[in-house]
Amino acid sequence: MSQQIPSQCPECRSLNVRVRRVSPNDHDRSEEWATRVECGDCDEYSDWFR
């Protein structure tokens, strides 16, 4: 089961959530592409997804 990417920031409730795909060359989490999620309004929320 995969994690669901939030549509709003769980910290400040902003809808300004940025989602980007990160190649394996640009992160050290695994040898696969990863998804990085960050809030565009607060510095409190960021998370990785597969």
Image: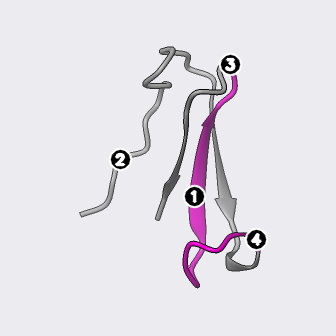
Against 25, residue 42 (above or below) is above
- The numbered mark at residue 41 is 3
- Label 1 sits on residue: 35
The answer to whether the residue labelled 2 contacts the one labelled 4, judged by CB atoms less than 8 Å apart, is no
Q: Residue drawn at (46%, 31%), measured in percent from left and top? A: 7
Against 1, residue 33 (above or below) is below
What is the three-letter code of the residue carrying label 2?
A: Gln
**Crowding at mark 3 (Cα within 10 Å: few <14, some 14-19, many 20+):** some
- Magenta span includes 34: yes
Q: Residue drawn at (69%, 70%), measured in percent from left and top? A: 27
What residue span does the magenta drawing correspond to?
26-40
N-terminal of the pair, mark 4 or mark 1, is 4
Pair 2/4: label in front: 4
| Mark 3 → mark 1, Cα distance in angstroms | 19 Å
| Mark 4 → mark 1, Cα distance in angstroms | 11 Å
- Label 4 sits on residue: 26
- The numbered mark at residue 4 is 2
What is the three-letter code of the residue carrying label 4?
A: Asp
Give SS at disc 3.
loop
The answer to whether the residue labelled 4 contacts the one labelled 1, judged by CB atoms less than 8 Å apart, is no
- Magenta span includes 35: yes
